[in-house]
Image: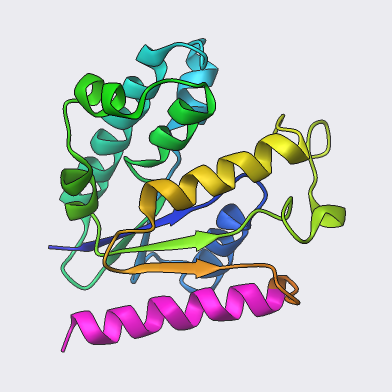
Amino acid sequence: MAIRIVLTGGPGGGKTTLMRELRADDPSAKRWILVPEAAPLLFQAGLNGHEPAFQRAVVRLQIALEEICAESATSDQVLLCHRGTLDPLAYWLRNGWNENTFFDFIDMTREEHFHRYYGVVHLQTAAIGADAFYIRWPHAHRPETIEQAAQTDLLCTYAWQEHPNYAFVDNNKRDWDAKSQIAHHTLTNWLKNKRR
């Protein structure tokens, strides 16, 4: 069975860019199966992101996307997920809703979310420590202000940091090339360790 790894973090951290880099290095998808982010698909469908039901829909669609991709993947491939099933908790908390209510509403425990993934790579948003590089609408498809992006990033940390394989890649004195190199190194090491 293919292993699953999450890319998380606030908007503008480099998740999409890293996935593009990995696809460029692996154009035939021999190693990486890139699972798309669920929330934008639901926004396109017209669902309201400020309703609790939206976050439940994100979780359900994320699971469906992962399962569909997993059905076609080989044991040598890796499902790299643009966000995971616990990312909606960050947005839930950003809306000011109760954490325990989230797990009841979704009908999954934090441990069940963790168990779905071998590892979590958190790419810190540029809104923290590199705000000159944070780009939003209309130049990029992200409406969040710098403050909202930073808050979401901190809430993603809160959601995922207790996962046994949680890797945090911050912006401290790093440009994108340095962040990307750390992420690539982390992924490579995890795959070596997993397959021993």
Q: Is residue 83 visible to the viewer in this orientation of the structure? A: no
- The residue under the point 39% across, 14% down is 52
- The residue under the point 73% across, 76% down is 174
Quadrant (top left, top right, bottom left, bottom right) of the C terminus: bottom left
On the picture, is 94 further left or further right than 33? right
Toward the viewer: 165 or 68?
Answer: 165
On the picture, is 149 further left or further right than 19? right
Measuring from the top left, give residue 65's x and y in whole percent: 30, 38
Stretch in magenta:
177-196
On the picture, is 98 further left or further right than 137? left
Task: Specify whether residue 118 is painted magenta.
Answer: no
Measuring from the top left, give residue 26's x and y in whole percent: 46, 71
Looking at the picture, the colour scheme in use is rainbow
- The residue under the point 44% across, 26% down is 92
Toward the viewer: 31 or 180?
Answer: 180
Measuring from the top left, give residue 175's x and y in whole percent: 75, 73
Task: Specify whether residue 179 is painted magenta.
Answer: yes
Toward the viewer: 39 or 152?
Answer: 152
Quadrant (top left, top right, bottom left, bottom right) of the N terminus: bottom left
Measuring from the top left, give residue 3's x and y in whole percent: 22, 64
Residue 44 picture quarter: top right
Q: Is residue 54 above or below residue 134?
A: above
Residue 106 picture quarter: top left
